Amino acid sequence: MDLLLYLHRILIVSGLLAGMGSSYQTSWNLLGMRTTPPPCVEIPQTLTLCNGIGYNQMRLPNLLGHDRMAEVAQQASHWVSLLNLKCHPDTRLFLCSLFSPVCLDRLIYPCRSLCEAVRQGCERRMNTYGYPWPDMVRCDQFPMDNDMCITVQSPASDEEEPAPCIACSQPDTYENMIDNFCRADFVFKTRVRKLRNEELRFRKTRVFKMKEGAVTIDDLKKPVFEHPNMSKCCGDLIGKLDTRGRVLVMGVKKKSSLFPTLIIPWENSNKVIRKARKTMKKFDCSNPATVLTTSKITNFIKPKPKRRPGQRGRGWKSTPGASVSCAGCNQPQTLKNLLDKFCTADYVIKTRIKKIKNNKMKCKRSRILKLEEGAASREELIAPTFTHPNMTECCGNILESVQDRKKRVIIMGDKNEADLITNLVLPWRNNTKLIKRVLRVAKKKGCYSR
């Protein structure tokens, strides 16, 4: 049923019941009785949790007592991660009924059954991450089911869905992938070989996680999943894969069999997968509320891909202990940031990276684009070497991201006593248009005269 039609039906019924008197009022009340209806306001884009909920206007104050839109958006933002876990299909409906109640003539509350259903689906996974069910949404404060509140719209099935069906219908959200990663015994990237006779067979795998004592490397060489409903559950997903048939697979081992918990298509263009893959390298599942910055994950299997002569390996690397600036290699690639760095830098050079080793970046002959008088000398910048305590960890991967063989980069920095400091390191070929625009704007602003 359409959400607006459903809410209007509630409003009509509540109007019929209005003549029953005050005896109908229940003991629960979140805001107290109001003599005048609160104002209606447009749901802003900043309220990400409830964008696209089915209506455009909400009451303010809302049912949680927030009377400023900035406060609503700030508080609601903490729940977006829970929404992306997809732990219950009515999570958005329940949360938005509180944060952005629909603007009708009468306040419409969520029923207690809706709260209990969402809590039952999500509380266990919230506890895993150290977040108990908040008292502000305690279910016993909401009314029992009646025609004046919002009931469960998508009840969960009484019978547990077969494992492959759950695995092959997982949402590809960042939070869901990290949640499954922490609960899995194994995680690997592979290619589908075939799906036949209720068996899903894979080719050689690239293992990202292997829980010690649960699975062995022999289990994951060319794994096979078997289930009576495998074709029905995963047939559509397998049929939509690209020609290479690549997938990301997570699962658990029970007795002697492997069971999938998540199977999603692997696409290099998928930004969510790239973000999750990066987090997996340094995420501490024993303390999942915090991403590790001081130690490495021990259960992460570092892949060893085949290399061509002279080619740098593309292994997984974490950056423990790295500072925010990180030798300038992780700077935001925006016009404003590049322009600020350019105009305040003592020097700007275009050069080629020779190698990054032992926290040193050695460069070949460089072209000086900017050099402040009294800063570094030209001799220092002809073939410079830059040193940083975290240079290898921070900038070790930049060579892999450079899109031309010459490894050309733009380096902006300052001279600090006898040392050259890098404030920004940016691959030239990857950002040619942006860099040229920075030079044009810098020339207009008077901080670039060449």
Image (spheres, rainbow, N blue to C red):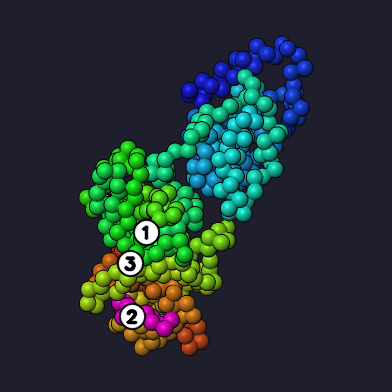
Look at the numbered discs 2 and 3 and tell me whether their residues touch, using CB distance below 8 Å.
Answer: no
Look at the numbered discs 1 and 3 and tell me whether their residues touch, using CB distance below 8 Å.
Answer: no
First in sequence, mark 2 or 3: give its number.
2
Residue range corresponding to the magenta coloring: 351-361
Q: Give the left or right position of residue 108, taking residue 262 as reference.
A: right
- Front-lying residue, 296 or 217: 217
Q: Main secondary structure of the magenta part?
A: strand
The residue that label 1 is drawn on is 188
Q: Amino acid at mark 2?
A: Lys
Q: Position of residue 142 (x, y in %)?
A: 68, 31
State the image quarter where residue 355 is shown.
Answer: bottom left
Q: Amino acid at mark 1?
A: Phe
Inter-mark Cα distance, 2 to 1: 31 Å
The residue that label 2 is drawn on is 355
Q: Give the left or right position of residue 331, taking residue 200 as reference.
A: right
The residue that label 3 is drawn on is 401
- Quadrant, the C terminus: bottom left
Q: Name which residue lies at 53% across and 60% down.
A: 285
